[in-house]
Image (cartoon, helix red, strand yellow):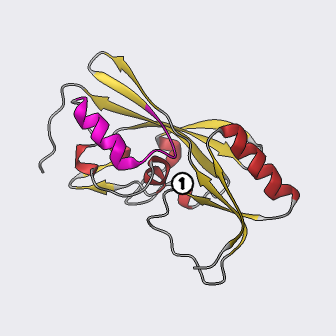
Amino acid sequence: GGMADYFCRVSSVEELKRAVKFAKQNNLKIFILGGGSNVIVSDDGFKGLVIKIELKEISFEEKDDCVFVTIGAGENWDKLVEISVDKLLYGIENLSFIPGTVGAGVVGNIGAYGSEIKDVFENVEVFDLETLKNITLNKDECMFGYRESIFKKEKNYIITKVSLKLFKNGKLNTS
């Protein structure tokens, strides 16, 4: 594929905000890039700004028999699965070896072997391109379907952070 007119990597919401403001001030189209494992670029390139999401964070909060995991959208999905399995947490183990980032996993409601990300999804923090503010959406607001979510239709949201609910005493899904 060809080159982008502009390219940047963002590792904070503040950097993302600055990049979006730059694009708006210069009347540029925006393309959000996760890991790039599912992207084909035209030989003509991209006429606008490509923003590569590199927001990194993984934190765990225990509550009763659950563990709430908060993950930056730029984290590698399979790395998250590996860490969760190492911590003996259940809920995403069937989603191992799926390429890409956590944010992209939410966009496509990734799934494998009887499991989907929506099964353990709590909420998502998004950056709204119109208001330039962060908002939080719950599971219902994300309108998950088979390899589908609101993020494939609503292009004004950029995923910055994801929260999942995993289980300490789970059962393997072997169905």
Front residue of 173/146: it is 173
**At 84% across and 64% down in the image, what residue appears?**
27
Q: Amino acid at mark 1?
A: Ile
Chain part drawn in magenta: 70-87
Residue designated by label 1: 150
Residue 76 visible somewhere in the drawing: yes
Which quadrant of the view contains residue 92? top left
Q: Is residue 5 magenta?
A: no
Residue 14 lies, in percent from the top left, at 72, 38
Residue 43 lies, in percent from the top left, at 61, 84
Label 1 CA crowd tier, 10 Å (few <14, some 14–19, many 20+): some
Residue 75 lies, in percent from the top left, at 46, 44
Quadrant, the N terminus: bottom right
Q: Is residue 19 left or right of residue 175?
A: right
**At 57% across and 76% down in the image, what residue appears?**
41
- In the rendered image, the residue lying farthest to the left is 174
| Label 1 element class | helix
Q: Is residue 77 magenta?
A: yes
Q: Is residue 93 left or right of residue 24?
A: left
Which quadrant of the view contains residue 147? bottom left
Residue 7 lies, in percent from the top left, at 69, 61
**At 38% across and 48% down in the image, what residue appears?**
77
